[in-house]
Amino acid sequence: MVHRLLVLLLAGSALAANPTPRPNPARFARDIATFAADRPEQGGIVFTGSSSIRLWTNLKQDFPDLPVLNRGFGGSVAHDLSVHFETVVARHAPKLLVTYTGSNDLNAKLTPDEAFADYTIFLDTFHTRFPKARVILTSVKIGEKRLAQIPLVHELNRKLQGWTAGRDWVRYLDCDSYLADSKGRPVRKFYRDDLLHLSEEGYAEWKKILEPVLREEWAKVKDL
């Protein structure tokens, strides 16, 4: 038993000493330059993260009476959000931040622990800069194209949900359960033909889940 515990500790130390390489944030130079060229919309609601956010192209139409801004960039991981924090988030001084990331992190071979660490570093950075602002953390979603990743997605979501429980400025929102059937497999109609990104029906369901929470959280900060 002692020997097994020692092996596990040594393995954990080896992983910590040899972290999985993160994708190069410079690959988004063009996207970030485009964001930087826009006049900043400040004091509203910023949506940021990977392609699930970027492809929500009718975000303003879905929430016409809310000051929403889409700052998603496809293929990004949580580390990219930290590296490009100033341009993507900080310059807009949002009162409410809505995030989606994590799937690409796992697909880049990061462990759930590594993806969790990168994600929470980004969120802590935001909270330190904007302590009165609030965050809605939308859960990592599953996809038929990445079936082998589903157990890792669930593990990462459990870690994120547990982390948010002790922080009153961030709210975890389950936006993943509706995507699965009774056997836990992705429901085809909620995905595009690529079997990864959400279809119109998928976004409609996501909106249905998110909207009441978005309005509730915005009401808490809009007059700050």
Image (cartoon, rainbow, N blue to C red):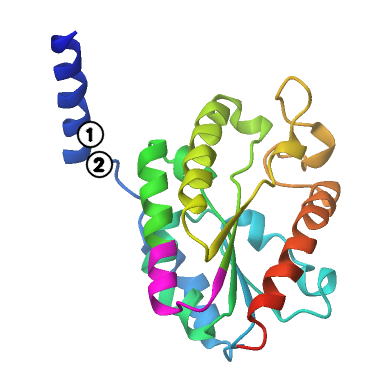
Give the vertical position of 16 relative to 203 (above or below).
Answer: above
Q: Position of residue 34 (x, y in %)?
A: 54, 79
Does the residue at mark 2 contact the one at mark 1 (Cβ under 8 Å)?
yes
Query: Which is more toward the observer, 152 or 39?
Result: 152
User: Which label sits on residue 19?
Assistant: 2
Q: Residue at x 65, y 60 (%)?
A: 53
Residue furthest top in the image: 1
Q: Residue at x 59, y 31 (%)?
A: 146
Q: Residue at x 56, y 80 (%)?
A: 94
Q: Position of residue 110 (x, y in %)?
A: 38, 39
Residue 204 is one of the magenta-drawn residues: no
Q: Position of residue 93 (x, y in %)?
A: 52, 84
Query: According to the image, label 1 marks what residue?
Result: 15
Residue 130 is one of the magenta-drawn residues: yes
Report, in whole angstroms, how far the alpha carbon at label 2 lies from the one at label 1: 6 Å
Give the vertical position of 140 relative to 74 (above or below).
Answer: above
Helix, strand or loop at disc 1?
A: helix
Position of residue 182 in the picture relative to residue 129 (left or right): right
Task: Give amino acid for label 2.
Answer: Pro
Quadrant hosting residue 195: top right
Segment colored magenta: 123-134
Q: Residues within 10 Å of mark 1 (few under 14, many from 20)?
A: few
In the rendered image, which quarter contains the C terminus? bottom right
Position of residue 6 in the picture relative to residue 136 (left or right): left
Task: Give amino acid for label 1.
Answer: Leu
Residue 24 makes an appearance in the image? yes
Give the vertical position of 195 relative to 93 (above or below).
Answer: above
Q: How many marks?
A: 2
